[in-house]
Amino acid sequence: MTDFTLQQIIYALVLGARWTVLLSLSAFILGGILGLVLMLGTISQRKWVKLPALGFIWLVQATPLLMQLFLIFFGPALFGKDVPAWMAACIALTLWSSAYLAEIWRGSVLAVQKGQTEAALSLAMLRGQALRYVVLPQAVRMALPPTAGFMVQIVKSTALASIVGFTELMKTGNILSNVTLDPFVVYGLVAIVYFCLCYPLSLVSRKMETVFDVTR
């Protein structure tokens, strides 16, 4: 069981990394959709829309992601329902991502000067039209760099999915470490794979900060 070559270990980690990438993309896309809805809710003037959106965001941000993952994975078992590890990880990361993306985008919308909205309203635009044609185009410019940077956090946070048995990169590393009895080499390679996944995203985020520098 311990006679694993370095090439076999790397190959197994690459296979695990595929699931890390898939889980990250799923959480980002689904979380982005839900985050957009939450963001629109937080800037709504209707309290019955705004307060639930803010409450959800505060609840998610005030509790550990690991606890949320445990509740989603083990909670339904109390009612006789089993949730697959993949689904539990995807739901937990989606909800977690949506809360933080909503705050990132809300901050970008609020960063647009109020005079922009007032000018649009003075031109007989409806509030929704002002948001769509005046505020959001400017907010997107400010939101892109932190959004790309948050992708790094999503990729690294997928490692928690190993706790509930989902075999992504970290879980694969745990299995290989137990089998090969060589944790230093295995986890060193795991770190390298995470670096290869996250570093390009960090470069993209920094590049966007330069390209979309709103202070220039």
Image (cartoon, rainbow, N blue to C red):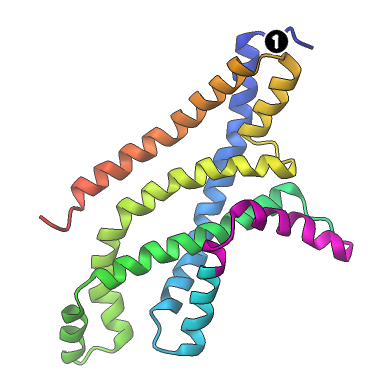
Where disc 1 sits, the SS reads loop
Residue 210 on image: x %, y %? 19, 46
Inspect the image, locate mark 1, and give the three-letter code of the amino acid beneath it. Phe
In magenta, the rendered stretch is: 59-80
Residue 64 vs 105, above or below: the answer is above
Q: State the residue in front, 135 or 106.
A: 106
Q: What residue is drawn where x is 63% and y is 31%? A: 16
Q: Residues within 10 Å of mark 1 (few under 14, many from 20)?
A: few
Extreme-left residue of the structure: 216
User: Looking at the image, is 183 positioned above or below residue 20?
Assistant: above
Choose between 146 and 133: the one closer to the eye.
Answer: 146
Main secondary-structure element of the magenta-colored stretch: helix
* Residue at the (61%, 25%) spot, across then down: 13
In the rendered image of this protein, does residue 204 appear above or below residue 89? Answer: above
Question: Residue 95 falls in which quadrant of the image?
Answer: bottom right
Q: Quadrant of the C terminus?
A: bottom left
Residue at 51% in and 42% down: 155
Which residue corresponds to the image point at 84% horizontal and 59% vertical from the top-left? 77
Task: Classify residue 170 as left or right of residue 33.
Answer: right
Q: Is 87 within the magenta?
A: no
List x then y, in percent, for residue 50: 46, 82
- Count of labels shown? 1
> Where residue 156 appears, x then y in whole percent?
52, 41
Which quadrant does the N terminus fall into? top right
The residue that disc 1 covers is 4
Q: Is residue 9 left or right of residue 41?
A: right
- Asked which quadrant contains residue 112, the reply is bottom left
- Could you say which quadrant of the image residue 159 lies in? top right
